Amino acid sequence: MASRYDISDEAWDLIADLFIGPQRKGRPRRDDRQMLNGILWVLCSGAPWRDMPEDFGPWSSVYQRFRDWRNQRVFSQMLKRLQLKLNEKGRIDLKTWMIDSTAIRASRSASGAGKKGPDEPADHALGRSRGGFTTKIHMLCDANGIPLRFLLSGGNASDINYAQPLLDGAHLPTVRGRPRKRCRWLLADKGYDAEALRQYCDRYRMQPVIPLRMMKRKPKPGLPRLFDKPKYAQRNIIERMFGWLKDNRRIGTRYDKLAESFAAMVSLACSLRCLKQLVSYRA
């Protein structure tokens, strides 16, 4: 029986070659599309792997396929390919980008993992904050609500500390020429009001649209920084994009012990957002 979370034929045609594995001797390989549909069911429903309907096959097989694809960086490759497709169609705004973060409450089952892998942070991107045991998703998106890049941190991390690493890693692929790394306007809230970030934007000829916090400041030489209030009104787009991502219940609450597993789920959720822009895919 088909699930409402199943990927459509048109969407599968765009990404099928990333997921289809080589044929091997012995027991036949389970259908890759069926395995992906099972992963999408877990992502969207938020249910444990063991509660997966039998229509997708054994839950252990689906989970093992998810781990294989996670280790092979298939989900991040999928996101980059869809960004390239969107850029080819002119659906990515290359002038106005925005950054923000959102806190994801972690369940009790997300704690207790040991150190695994060279790329796995020691704290597994978990930390204690005012909201409890949480993970932060630091996101960069365009003015159309298309996610461009994200980073994970513990919930107690400061937003400003991840602003420059997030922007430095921006790598929007294009059909011709160099990848796009910079924008014209950068929108952010008061949490990013820091002189270091403003100087960073000046260095790369970006215009920061960031409101000033109410605090005493030392007078600085030169012209005063202007605040484009009408432009700043577009910043609600990234807030709504976080809402769209959290409609996937596996993102609204973190259940994964490993940061790389949760990052794979976030990449998959961002890919669904891109697929919706391309083929009106609804999850």
Image (cartoon, rainbow, N blue to C red):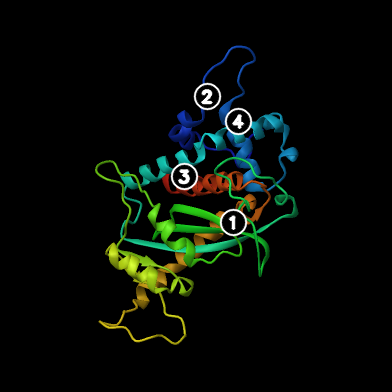
Check disc 4 and report its element: helix, strand or loop: helix
Q: CA distance from mark 1 to mark 2?
A: 30 Å
Specify the amino acid type for callout 3: Leu
Instruction: Give the position of the N terminus as an image quadrant.
Output: top right
Check disc 3 and report its element: helix, strand or loop: helix
Q: Residues within 10 Å of mark 1 (few under 14, many from 20)?
A: some
Please name the residue shown 34% across and 86% down the image: 219
- Is residue 216 positioned above or below 18 on the image? below
Please name the residue shown 40% across and 68% down the image: 234
Image position, residue 197 (x, y; %): 39, 68
Q: Residues within 10 Å of mark 3 (few under 14, many from 20)?
A: many
Please name the residue shown 62% across and 50% down the image: 122
Image position, residue 69 (x, y; %): 55, 34
The residue mark sitting in front, 2 or 4, is 2
Q: Report the side of 171 relative to 258 (left or right).
A: left
Specify the amino acid type for callout 1: Lys
Determine whether label 2 and label 4 are within 8 Å by CB: no
Using the image, tell me which numbered label, if any, was put on residue 246: 1
The residue mark sitting in front, 1 or 2, is 2
Specify the amino acid type for callout 4: Gln
Determine whether label 1 and label 2 are within 8 Å by CB: no
First of labels 3, 2 by sequence position: 2
Q: Which residue is mark 3?
A: 275
First of labels 1, 3 by sequence position: 1
Residue 114: name its quadrant. top right
First of labels 1, 2 by sequence position: 2
Using the image, tell me which numbered label, if any, was put on residue 21: 2
Q: Residues within 10 Å of mark 2 (few under 14, many from 20)?
A: few
Using the image, tell me which numbered label, if any, was put on residue 186: none
Residue most extreme to the top = 25
Check disc 1 and report its element: helix, strand or loop: helix
Q: CA distance from mark 3 to mark 4?
A: 18 Å
